Every structure is written in structure tokens, then in C-alpha cells.
Amino acid sequence: MSLRGSTASSDAVAAQQTTERRRQFELGADGPRLRSSARARYLGCMAHTHDHPRTLRLARLVAWSVTLAGLLLVTMRYGALPERLPLTRWTTAPKSWLIALRVPGIHLLSVALIEVLSPGVRRLAGFTRGQLFTAILLLTASFKAVMTNSALALLPAEYPALTVPTLVVAEAGVLAALFVGRDLLRGGQLRRLAWTKTESALALSLGVLLLALELPIFAARR
């Protein structure tokens, strides 16, 4: 009996030591003994263990399909569009290819910008919902693209009853993304976001293009 008791006690001590070393490793206590790159890879893998890769793949497929289809739809319907097209809910402008494709172009560039910026979020150590956060933003952009591109392509027919549901669902998507990404607002996580030079250059280029597509609104106000 004493031998069995001694063996069980030894096993319990060994298990406790193993658990303690694993905890110290995750907290960084053994950091000096590890190469920083290896530890970063380990933490990165742990961070995405419970993420949603399938959801992100589906959201990407939907987002790119919807925005490209909207651009193609408005292009094909260009000849049937009225002579004046809406810039905002209160202003219009003479029909041109720039004005007609402005809204579908904004949606397409918005999806591209989300894609470019999302790797920096998903690489952030300790944030385990980067893929779900990105997927929600992509699906929200997709829904808004479907509604606004369809409304544009169906002109001169108007469906004002769809305005409020579109705004409500879009706002709900943004709020859902903020809820999922709430950890980004804690502990200085936003300051730790980092992107590669290529990602930064692409994001800047997309931002400039988005601003350029807003210029017709300012020109119409003059």
C-alpha cells in the first residue's frame, strides 16, 4: 500500500510540475530560454485555435462575388439608367460612367481595404477572434453592397421602404463587429497593431481611391 501511495504521490507531483511549467510558458516566464520567433509562432497558433477559418472563407467568397456582380450589373444596366443619378439622398448629378460606377466601386474598394487591413488584426497575439471579426465586416459590406447596387441598377424605379432596413442591418453588423472585437479596445491592443510595408502601401492606395470617389459629392455642392 505504501508503494502504491508513493507512486500516486509522485505522479501527482509530476503532473503539477508539468501544469505549472505550461502556465509559466504561456505567461512568458520561460521567455529568456526560448527564441522569440518560436514563442511568437506558438502564441500565434494558440490565438487562432478557436477562430473561424471556414466562416472567413465563406465571407470572402460572398463579399467578392457580391461586389463584383454589383459592378457588372450596373455596367450592363448603364444604358437604361436615367439621365440624372443620385450622389446622395438629396443630390443628383448628370449620368456618366464615373457617377454610375461610383457606388459599386466604393463597395469593391471597401472589401479590398478590409482584406488588406485584416492580417494585422489576425496576427495580433492574444486576440482570438480576428477571423470572425473580419468575416462580420465583410458580410456587412456585402449586404450593403447588395442593397445599394440593386437600388442603383433598378433606377428609375425607387424603393424607399428599403432604406431603413438597409441602414438598420448595416448598423447591426458594425455593432456586432465592435462586440466581437471589443478586446482590441482594451490593454492598448490597438497600439500593437502592425502591418507590413506592402499592406500599408496597399491600404494607403485604397484609401486615396476611396477619397477620390467621394470628390463628385463635393463638386456637386459648389
Image (cartoon, rainbow, N blue to C red):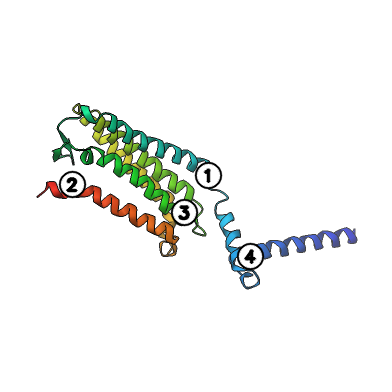
Q: Nearer the viewer, mark 1 or mark 4?
A: 1
Are the residues at dot 3 and dot 1 in contact (C-beta closer than 8 Å)?
no
Residue carrying label 4: 25
Residue 28 lies, in percent from the top left, at 59, 68
**Quarter-of-image position of residue 14:** bottom right
Residue carrying label 3: 119
Q: Which residue is at 51% across, 53% downward?
A: 128
> What's the distance in space between the residues labelled 2 and 3, CA to CA?
32 Å
Picture layout, residue 97 above or below residue 26: above
Residue carrying label 1: 53
Q: Nearer the viewer, mark 4 or mark 3?
A: 3
Is 45 in front, or is 79?
79
Residue 45 lies, in percent from the top left, at 58, 55
Q: Earlier in the sequence, mark 4 or mark 3?
A: 4
Q: Amino acid at mark 3?
A: Pro
Residue carrying label 2: 216
> What's the distance in space between the residues labelled 4 and 3, CA to CA?
25 Å
